[in-house]
Amino acid sequence: MTTSTLSTHTAEAGDYHDRKRYAWLLSVVAPLAAPAGPVLYLQTGQTVWLWIFLAFFYLGIPALDRLFGEDRSNPPEAAVPALEADNYYRYITWAVVPMLWISFIFNVGFLATHELPWYLTLAVIIATGNILGFGLNLGHELGHKKIWIDRKLALLTLALGGYGHFSVEHNRGHHRHVATPEDPASSRMGESIWRFVFREMPGAYFRAWDLEAERLERAGKSEWSLENEIVQAGLLTAALYGTLVLVFGAAILPLLLAIAFWGAFQLTSANYIEHYGLVRQKLANGRYEQTQPHHSWNSNHIASNLALFHLQRHSDHHAHPTRSYQSLRDFPELPTLPVGYFGMFLLAYVPPLWFRVMNPRLLAAVNRDVARINFEPARRNRLVNQYGLVERASPVDAA
């Protein structure tokens, strides 16, 4: 079916109504697809349910994106203060937190108490890891807020998957270094996701720890202080996983670790596609230019954006990181993904397909300007020759 596109509206603030106001509740419901499979399996005895709801994430949501198309509409700037002040949108994010915890514990209990063949165990592990992926996305939204309860709910959610360092790393590390060769969370042209993960996961953790240790040192406190956000989240994770091991036995521990890895890999997958090959220019003073919308890949696909709190309007998020999800905007002539994140994840998992689709899009987005491409160093010369690119001296080199 041909995709539909909602036209940009320019209503005045007094006339503006968020047409997606109640559709944002999909962000609350979407994670429930993960425990829905085990619930229906228990009711019917049919193992197919364990696969159907897993398929929903990677096939169903992309199909809905194609069905409903894109939404390029923006709220008028005059309406943004009212949107930001509307607690309805905050309460939606809060409602997701217990959904994630209940779904995660239920699925872990299901795995611990049912003998399944390995392939069905794997299906439930992946589905449960997706719960943690939604949690990381929620932690991303809440972790940017200045209100204490939002940030603590972010920490509580991130602790589910043992990824409590994310808010520190993302806010104080990734946003500072995004789209530069120094950033472990910005992927490079020619770098596969299977190579990227070995740079991104450990790099993010060590950067987060260093940032938090530096903050505490300036305050005259130990890096192991309970004021360390990473320590706080780690203790929550240890308490949760320890309790689950006590209840279900030590055999559940490797399953918990597998689930936690897949949850973290969903963040890796998002990081991989969000800035692929894009780079900020280094100025004559040695600093990088200010982050602009064109330093991130954008997607306006409706279904996946509703499930992910507008994460896919990533261009505006990095240009204006304090904006809440309901206020994020589209801009003309942005680097644009062909499908939403869930479809892009599958593409990324097959590197030859990813490179075939995304390398030409990257070259078009930067007008084939080599200086605006973040290359995987070992593949730079090969890619320059493969695509017939011309090396030009950068302004810094010329100076």
Image (cartoon, grey):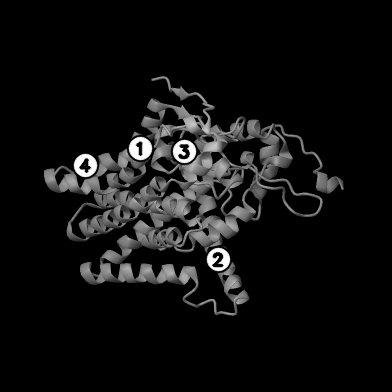
Which badge, 1 or 2, is on the more N-terminal residue?
A: 1
Q: How many marks?
A: 4
Image quadrant in which you'd find residue 45: top left
Describe the element under mark 4 as helix, strand or loop: helix
Residue at 28% from the left image edge and 46% from the top image edge: 32
Residue corresponding to mark 4 = 49
Residue that mark 3 sits on: 344
Residue 23 percent across, percent down from the top left: 36, 36
Of the numbered discs 2 and 4, the one sitting upstream in the chain is 4
Separation of residues labelled 3 and 2 (CA atoms): 27 Å
Q: Secondary structure at mark 3?
A: helix
> For this view, does 240 lie left or right of residue 45?
right
Residue 398 rendering spot, x and y as whole percentages? 86, 45
User: At label 1, which amino acid type do we have?
Assistant: Tyr
Q: Are marks 3 and 2 in contact (CB under 8 Å)?
A: no
Please give the name of the residue rendered at 52% of the width and 43% of the height, measured from the top-left corner: 81
Q: CA distance from mark 4 to mark 3?
A: 24 Å
